[in-house]
Image (cartoon, rainbow, N blue to C red):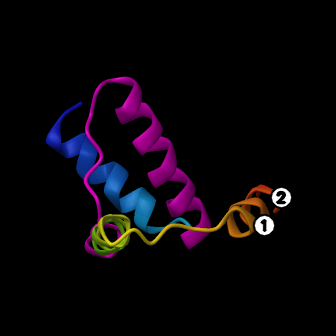
């Protein structure tokens, strides 16, 4: 695929509805994962991970009741 091909695809992607662009991004991530591409966290995701690690270091863990409440929610 050439740089020109990528540019044409970028123009086409820009015309898609947001939902379709989000779906495309997820698909690209899945393909990348199968080919060993490492996912780079967004700043927001990185902040959430850092907070979770800090909570773990402080010994702050979810209770069994909290875990069960999350696990019983339907997956979408």
Q: Residue under circle 1?
A: 69
Residue ranking furthest to the left = 3
Q: Specify the segment rendered in magenta.
A: 18-46
- Number of other residues with Cα within 10 Å of mark 1, as a class: few under 14, some 14 to 19, many 20 or more: few
Rendered residue at 29%/26% (across/down): 36
Q: Residue at x 29, y 71 (%)?
A: 54
Farthest residue in the front direction?
59
Q: Position of residue 65 (x, y in %)?
A: 75, 67
Given contact means CB atoms under 8 Å apart, are the residues at marks 1 and 2 in contact? yes
The image quadrant that residue 59 belongs to is bottom left
Q: Quadrant of residue 51?
A: bottom left
Q: Nearer the viewer, residue 51 or 10?
A: 51
Q: Main secondary structure of the magenta part?
A: helix
Question: Which quarter of the image is occupied by the N terminus?
Answer: top left
Few, some or many residues within 10 Å of mark 2 (<14, 14–19, 20+) = few
Residue beneath disc 2: 72
* 16 relative to 40, above or below: below
Rendered residue at 41%/43% (across/down): 29
> How many callouts does the rendering have?
2
Picture quarter containing residue 20? bottom right
Does residue 28 appear left or right of residue 39 in this picture?
right
The x, y position of residue 17, in whole percent, is 58, 70
- Residue 61 rendering spot, x and y as whole percentages: 50, 67
Q: CA distance from mark 1 to mark 2?
A: 5 Å
In this view of the protein, can residue 17 be seen by the observer?
A: no
Looking at the rendered structure, the secondary structure element under dot 2 is loop
Quarter of the figure that contains the C terminus: bottom right
Helix or strand or loop: what does disc 1 sit on?
Answer: helix
Is 32 displayed left or right of 7 in the figure?
right
């Amino acid at each position: 695929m050439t740089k020109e091909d990528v540019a044409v695809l970028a123009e086409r992607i820009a015309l898609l509805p947001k939902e379709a662009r989000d779906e495309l991004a997820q698909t690209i991530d899945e393909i990348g994962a199968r080919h060993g591409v490492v996912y780079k966290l967004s700043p927001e995701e990185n902040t959430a991970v850092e907070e979770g690690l800090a909570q773990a270091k402080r010994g702050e863990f979810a209770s069994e009741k909290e875990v069960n409440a999350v696990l019983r929610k339907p997956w979408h």
